[in-house]
Amino acid sequence: MNENAVELLLYIGMLLFAQARPAEALHVLEPLHEDLCLVYGPTDEMTAGVAETLAVICLDANGPGTSES
């Protein structure tokens, strides 16, 4: 896996989220996370960082205290 490509995708995902475009950020970061899990494993530092970012995006999208029925 090309480390430069991974970093570029991570930066693009973060930029999209910062621009209040969470759906597009998820579209970039979810496949990246899957690839990182396969190549480096879920405990890898970068993989865990992407997982944390995805969790923040999902929390932000759902809002605290909202529940789906």
Image: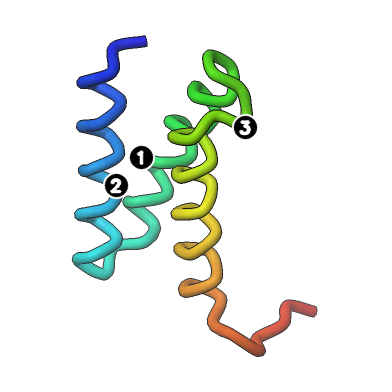
Residue 63 pos. (x, y %): 54, 82
Task: Identify the colour scheme used.
Answer: rainbow
Q: Is residue 4 above or below residue 17?
A: above
Query: Which secondary structure lies at badge 2?
Result: helix
Q: Is residue 46 above or below residue 59?
A: above
Numbered disc in front, either 1 or 3: 3
Residue 15 pos. (x, y %): 20, 54
Q: Is 64 on the left-hand or right-hand side of 50?
A: right
In the rendered image, which residue does mark 1 sit on?
28
In the rendered image, which residue does mark 2 sit on?
13
Q: Is 55 on the left-hand or right-hand side of 3?
A: right
Q: Is residue 68 above or below residue 18?
A: below
Query: Which secondary structure lies at badge 1?
Result: helix
* Picture residue at 42% right of the left edge, 49% below the top: 26
Q: Nearer the viewer, residue 8 or 61?
A: 8
Residue 34 pos. (x, y %): 55, 28
Residue 9 circle label: none
Label 3 neighbour load within 10 Å: few <14, some 14-19, many 20+:
few
Pointers 1 and 2 in contact (C-beta within 8 Å): yes
Numbered disc in front, either 3 or 2: 3
Pointers 1 and 3 in contact (C-beta within 8 Å): no
Residue 54 pos. (x, y %): 49, 53
Q: Earlier in the sequence, mark 1 or mark 2?
A: 2
The N terminus - image quarter: top left
Query: Which secondary structure lies at badge 3?
Result: loop
Label 1 neighbour load within 10 Å: few <14, some 14-19, many 20+:
some
In the rendered image, which residue does mark 3 sit on?
43
* Picture residue at 54% right of the left edge, 29% below the top: 44
User: Distance from label 1 to label 3 (Cα)?
Assistant: 20 Å
The amino acid on which the numbered mark 2 sits, given as a three-letter code, is Gly
